[in-house]
Image (cartoon, helix red, strand yellow):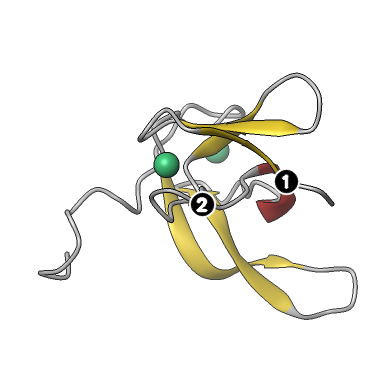
């Protein structure tokens, strides 16, 4: 499954699903936007999806393994980078 140029677990979110505790996998087309188009998002084994707006892409490592901090900011759970993401 893992591509040779990517460490095997970069698609697995550091924190489990907040609803059921299952692991979350970055999945293409998992999230449907209000306009009907789809977007990649974290989806757990039981089908719970996190709004991709809540998992902004880290500008340093390129992963979406991020959490909201107070204010408009995010913190990357992979590299520890903090950044703000205007909406
Ligand atoms: Zn879940
Ligand atoms: Zn990062």
Q: Is mark 1 within 8 Å of ligand 2?
A: no
Please provide percent x and percent y for residue 46. Answer: 51, 46
- Tell me the residue at 35%/54% (across/down): 11
- Per the image, the residue denoted by label 2 is 59
* Closer to us: 20 or 14: 14
> Quick check: 20 left or right of 38?
left
- Per the image, the residue denoted by label 1 is 85
Look at the numbered discs 2 and 1 and tell me whether their residues touch, using CB distance below 8 Å. no
Please provide percent x and percent y for residue 58. Answer: 51, 48
Whether residue 17 is situated above or below residue 2 in the rendered picture = above
Location of ligand 2 given as a quarter of the image: top left
Q: Badge 1 local density, few (<14 within 10 Å), some, or many (20+)?
A: some
Q: From this viewpoint, which residue is outermost toward the left?
A: 4
Figure quadrant of residue 37: bottom right
Q: In terms of secondary structure, where does tag 2 sit?
A: loop
Q: Badge 2 local density, few (<14 within 10 Å), some, or many (20+)?
A: some
Q: Is mark 2 within 8 Å of ligand 2?
A: yes
> Quick check: 79 left or right of 65?
left
- Tell me the residue at 54%/29% (across/down): 20
Whether residue 4 is situated above or below residue 74 in the rendered picture = below
- Tell me the residue at 69%/76% (across/down): 38
Q: From this viewpoint, which residue is outermost toward the top?
A: 70
- Tell me the residue at 53%/37% (across/down): 66
Q: In terms of secondary structure, where does tag 1 sit?
A: loop
Please provide percent x and percent y for residue 36. Answer: 83, 79
Please provide percent x and percent y for residue 70. Answer: 75, 19
> Quick check: 51 left or right of 26?
right
């Amino acid at each position: 499954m893992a591509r040779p140029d990517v460490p095997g677990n970069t698609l697995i979110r550091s924190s489990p699903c907040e609803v059921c505790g299952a692991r979350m996998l970055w999945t293409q087309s998992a999230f449907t936007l209000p306009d009907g188009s789809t977007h990649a998002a974290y989806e757990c084994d039981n089908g719970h999806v996190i709004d991709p707006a809540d998992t902004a892409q880290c500008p340093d490592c390129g992963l979406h393994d991020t959490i909201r901090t107070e204010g408009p900011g995010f913190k990357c759970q992979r590299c520890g980078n903090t950044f703000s993401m205007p909406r």
